[in-house]
Image: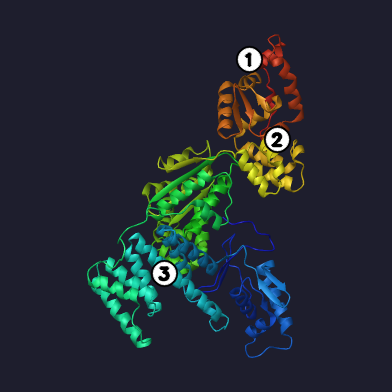
Amino acid sequence: MTSMVSATRPALRLQLVGPLRLLSMETAEPVPIPKGRATTLFVVLAVHRGQLVGLDDIVAALWPSGGTTNAPQIVASLVSRLRRPLGSSLEHLDGGYRLDTRGWEVDVDDAERLVRSAERDLAAAEPGLSHAAARRAIELLGVGRPLEAHRSLTVVDDLDPVIDALLRRARGVAWASALALGDAESARREAAEATAADPLDEEAQRALMQALCDLGERNAALHTYSRLQRILRQDLGADPDPQTQSLHLRILRGEGGRASDRGTRPDRCGRRFEAVASSAGTQVVGRDDVLAEFADAWRSVVRGESAVLTLLGGAGCGKSEALRAGANHVTATGGVVLDAHCSRYERVTMMQPLVAAIRRFCAGEHPDRVRDLARGLEPALVELIPALADVLSPAVAPHPAPSYGHAVEAVQVFLLNVARRQPLMIAVDDAHVADDGTITVLHRLRASNAPRMLLAVTAQDGDADALSAALGATSRRLFLKPLTAHDVAELARRWRVPAAAGEVYALTGGVPGLVVETLRAVAGGADPDHLVPPLPILRDAALEHLRAAGDAAVRLLALVAVFGRRFRFEDLVRLGFPLPDAVAATQRALRLGLLLVDGDALVFASGLVHAAALASVPEPIRRNVERCLPVAVDRSAPSAVVDLRRGRGRSPIDGLDPAS
């Protein structure tokens, strides 16, 4: 779920820990970096990303033994080569160059954000979210040494202490949150890794003692203290600090080690969504109830449970935006998100949305982790995702194409393996048009009650019968309603056109997609008092919203638009709609929020949709309908109209093409 970036400023993923890698965030394909000194220049700029690197520093890095007389010209040539993959992200400023990685994903920066989030969560007595974020940071930082193939460059020395400090902080919050959760084994593992990296890290040694004590390994805890005492005396000529000595004394006395209530766990396992959303840059208006459900579901997931959310509504109601906000919440708290988008045009390709999501996920992971997650699944996964052949090829023997059942099982098991390693959210947008394979995988995942997994899907209300059956009664169904006048006013304020809020709400009926497009038009200079007939971009948005109701409802709404924004149900039958079809189409339009009930009449919920529906009726048909209207309710009408009312004549709707 990536934000839009201009064509001259590509969205890229940069890996500095382990081997240097640059990937496209859109396609997950590797982005080639020019070889030779161009690569060295890129490393220098990447280590100091976001900062101006002076020309003298660049020359010193490229020619350590001394520069050449034409060094500036050579640097300019190298920059020109780098601009092919980097675009305008590589900036020339006075005195040097800067790599602007805003809009990129950089592993070191992501890890720093996760560590800050983990520390905030731990301070807020929310160890579940804290531990998930810390573990994710450790995974990002623990894949190897920074820039493994470029260790000879002195600039790498600037990155080493940054990575070491981040890894130390991540491990510290990981063992602290694990102890708070009562997960002594995880705390022991994290603390042991920290003491192996730095035997003089007394805080880590103390955490290891506490974890061993909680595991019932009292002698091992006492041995850890003795080893620490010996190392400190030999290397520093000092004894352990009073806090460590106090812990040692409590273990000797058999008091369990903890000075406070041992084994108590906070009741809360996740902070308010608003705080996380703010830190993640999410600004979703009018969806507090939906976001609260996301936060509640994710709290249960980080506690080791499973959860299923289904977001329902019509076109343009903000389902995708709410799903992205939920994904931002998960990412900000250390979870993994696999996002899949379904399209009716890709239904012929088996499990295409999930396969594409797995492919993007694997492209951003260390190959060793991918191999671990795919163990035993290699033949089927390589057949589904040929790009994985280079990673999994040593384990792949010649094999026939997997059967449908084997392919479905491979995708299911791979996703379960990801969830076992890290709390996982599988976000499936427009799941009502998913292929049978994708529906089957979702059903199996839901039926397995896989721990630490959140299934979150969006679907169009009225078209989700197969999906609802697959997800079962355990799914929380959230219906997204139109925005309120207050919500539209808040959006208008953000678009800096607050005076237009009332007119925008009246035109759009609070449908989020129409609200945003209308505010964009007004902010661009359009007069809010003269938006009907709608501008082409608004008409297209309204027609897309309208067509989501299906052909029958489109024909109904296009015809009754001639009556005006308000009409009666019996008018449909008078104009030739068979009663069962009229009932079904009206109910669908009501369910999608295209129509509202007003006493004994029906009314278009959106002025823009009404105007677009009216404009979709060809002029000859509209005139024909308008001529019929005055006599259609007249008992003394000519026989032709009576025949029409009795279904024997030609209805004006017979020439109406819903695609027009």
**Labels 1, 2: front one:** 2
Residue at the front extreme?
242
Q: Relative to residue 252, is residue 453 depicted above or below?
A: above
Q: Mark 2 — residue?
A: 612
Q: Residues within 10 Å of mark 1 (few under 14, many from 20)?
A: some
Pick whichever, 562 or 318, lies toward us.
318
Which of the marked residues, 1 or 3, is nearer the chain's N terminus? 3
Image quarter (top left, top right, bottom left or bottom right) of the N terminus:
bottom right
Question: Disc 1 designates what residue?
Answer: 646
Q: Distance between the residues labelled 1 and 3?
A: 80 Å
For label 1, the SS is loop
Q: Which amino acid does label 2 sit on?
A: Ala
Q: Estimate the x, y position of residue 151 in percent, counting from the top left.
A: 53, 81
Residue found at the very far top of the displayed protein? 636
Residue under label 3: 172
Is residue 434 visible in the rendered image? The answer is no
Residue at 51% of width from left, 58% of height from top?
Answer: 332
